[in-house]
Image (cartoon, grey):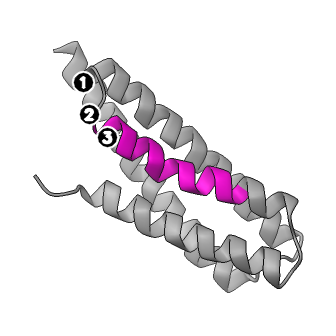
Amino acid sequence: MGKSILTDKSYAFAIMVVKLSQYLVSKKRELVLSKQFLRSGTAIGALIREAEFAQSKKDFVNKMSISLKEANETLYWLDLLKDTGYIKEEEYQIHFGLNKELVAMLVSSIKTSKLNIQK
């Protein structure tokens, strides 16, 4: 079976997060916010990948829920980076839009999985 759209999108987002983090460190000399952004932004996909081999449906939902929390945290760091002037509005909009898409997909996946557990 091939990778899911969620897996692919979260991996592509993680690559963007790494590149933005590298830019923030090398060009803006920003070390603290960029590290937090890097950690939470890459954790989204790592947790989704980890959920692929969950031991049970409940374990799957748990890992996906943690991924959702990381995605929400990443939105916080994006807001902070924009509002402190480290990234421009255009850069923010690109990352924000992709992150919100991941949030929506994660919420949908979690809801569907919880319904399947109840059956």
Determine whether, in the image, residue 70 is placed left or right of residue 106.
Answer: right
Q: CA distance from mark 1 to mark 3?
A: 10 Å
Residue toward you, 21 or 95: 21
Label 3 environment density (alpha carbons within 10 Å; few <14, some 14–19, many ≥20):
some
Query: Dominant secondary structure of the magenta stretch?
Result: helix
What residue is shown with label 2?
112
Element assignment for label 3: helix
Number of other residues with Cα within 10 Å of mark 2, as a class: few under 14, some 14 to 19, many 20 or more: few
State which region is magenta.
37-52
Please, is residue 24 above or below residue 71 in the view? below
Q: CA distance from mark 1 to mark 2?
A: 5 Å
The residue type indicated by label 3 comes to Ser
Q: Secondary structure at mark 2?
A: helix
Q: Which mark is residue 109?
A: 3
Q: Which residue is mark 1?
A: 115
Q: Earlier in the sequence, mark 1 or mark 3?
A: 3
